[in-house]
Amino acid sequence: MSEKLLIFIQKHRYALISLGSVLALIVFWWVGSLLDLFNPVFIPPIGSVWEAFLKTLRDGYKGYSLLYHIGASMKRLFIAVTLAFAAASALGLVCGMSKTVLAILDPFIEFYRALPPLAYNTLIVLWLGIGDESKIALLFLSAFAPIFIQTVFGVQRIPRDRINGARSLGADRFRLFFKVIFPSALPDILTGLRTAVGVAYATLVAAEMVASASGIGWMVLDASKYIMYSTVYFGIIIMGLIAILIDAALRQLIGLVTPWQRETA
C-alpha cells in the first residue's frame, strides 16, 4: 500500500467508516432480498425500489415530475425558514437584552413549542386555508422556537466583562450591539438555524398532509395509501439525502461566517 494511500485513509478514516457502514447496509438489503429473508410487502427488494425511482424520474408522480415535487417542498421549506430566521433572531436579540420583553413573550413560545405540529395544523388550515400559506405557516412555527431560544441563550451568556469593557471604551448602544452583542451571539444564532432546519424538515410531511398535490413529503404519504412501498422507500431515501446535503451546506455556512467555531460546528 503506497504512502499516499495510507495518508488519504488516515485523513479521511471516519468518512470512510461511515461510507463502509452505508455500503454494508445496502449489501445486507440486497443479499436479504435475494435469499427472501424479508417480507417484500414491508421491505421491498432493492431492485424494485430502484425501478420505482427510475419510473418516477421518467414519468413523474400523479402528473408532476420528481424534480417538481422536490422543488415544491424545498420552496416551502426555504420561505418558512427564511421568515423564521429573520423574525426569531431579531426577537431573540431583543428578548436577550430585555428581561421584561422576554417575560412577556416566553410563556407563549414555551407553550406552543412543546406541542406536536399536527396538534395545531388543523387550526392553521382553518385560519389560512388549504393553500401553501398554511403549509409555510406550519413550517415557520416549527422553525421559529429553536432559533428564538438559541438566540436568547446566546445573548444572555455573553460575559458581562465584555459588555462593560466596550462601554468603558466609549461604545454607544449602536456600536455595542453591532460590535459586541451580535457577533458574540452569532454562533448560537446559526446553531439555532441548523436545529430549526432539521425540525422544520421533519415537519414537512405534516405540512403537506392536508389538501396537497405536490411535494416529496406528500408523495411519500400518498404512495403509502396505495401500498406503493417501493415508492415510499425511495422517497424516504431522497428526503434523507436532501437533509444530509442541507445540513452539510449549513455547516459550511457556519464555518465561513464564524471560522473560530469551525471545529465545533
Image (cartoon, rainbow, N blue to C red):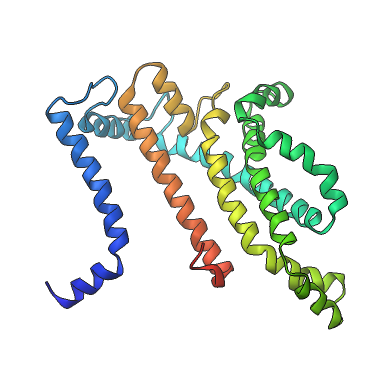
Quadrant of res 94: bottom right
Point out residue 240 in the picture as x, y percentages from the top left corner: 41, 42
User: Relative to residue 12, is residue 210 depicted above or below?
Assistant: above
**Residue at the image position 56 percent from the left and 52 percent from the top:** 194
Q: Looking at this rendering, what residue extends furthest in the bottom direction?
A: 169
32 lies left or right of 115: left
Quadrant of res 112: top right
User: Relative to residue 144, is residue 231 depicted above or below?
Assistant: above
Query: Is residue 33 at all visible to an observer of this figure?
Result: yes
Q: Nearer the viewer, residue 2 or 53?
A: 2
Q: Looking at this rendering, what residue extends furthest in the top direction?
A: 226
Q: Nearer the viewer, residue 119 or 249?
A: 119
**Residue at the image position 58 percent from the left and 69 percent from the top:** 258
122 lies left or right of 170: left
Point out residue 147 in the picture as x, y percentages from the top left corner: 66, 50
Point out residue 155 in the picture as x, y percentages from the top left corner: 73, 61
**Residue at the image position 49 percent from the left and 32 percent from the top:** 215
Q: Nearer the viewer, residue 164 or 33?
A: 164
Query: Is residue 75 at all visible to an observer of this figure?
Result: no
139 lies left or right of 97: left
Point out residue 124 in the picture as x, y percentages from the top left corner: 69, 26
